Amino acid sequence: LIVTKIVGQVRSSNSAALEIDKHFGFEHEARITDFYDNGDSLEVLTMTRSQCMILNSPLWAKVVDRVARI
């Protein structure tokens, strides 16, 4: 299984979660207005494999290699 894109969903009112997602490299892709009963919107954030620090790390490559051998 090869990851090509990671998708995150955050309530628009959760500014702390939005900030940390952006800090890790997620980019805003879409907003779905009035998604929640209280009128809050759903923010959709994405990151490609090439943008992801974890998926591109040597440590992750070792984990994937170990799992592939099982």
Image (tube, helix red, strand yellow):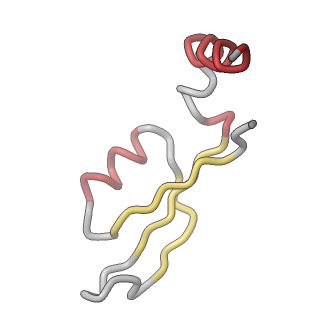
Pick the front one: 9 or 20: 9
Image quarter where the C terminus lies is top right
Residue in the picture at 40% in, 83% down: 35
Pick the front one: 40 or 62: 62
Residue in the picture at 33% in, 50% down: 19
Residue 14 sits above or below residue 55 on the image: below
Residue 40 sits above or below residue 57 on the image: below
Q: Is residue 27 left or right of residue 42?
A: right
What number of labels is visible? Answer: 0
Q: Quadrant of residue 11?
A: bottom left
What percent of the width, then of the height, locates residue 25? 50, 41
What percent of the width, then of the height, locates residue 24? 44, 38
Image quarter where the N terminus lies is top right
Residue in the picture at 44% in, 68% down: 43
Residue in the picture at 72% in, 43% down: 4
What percent of the width, then of the height, locates residue 8? 48, 55
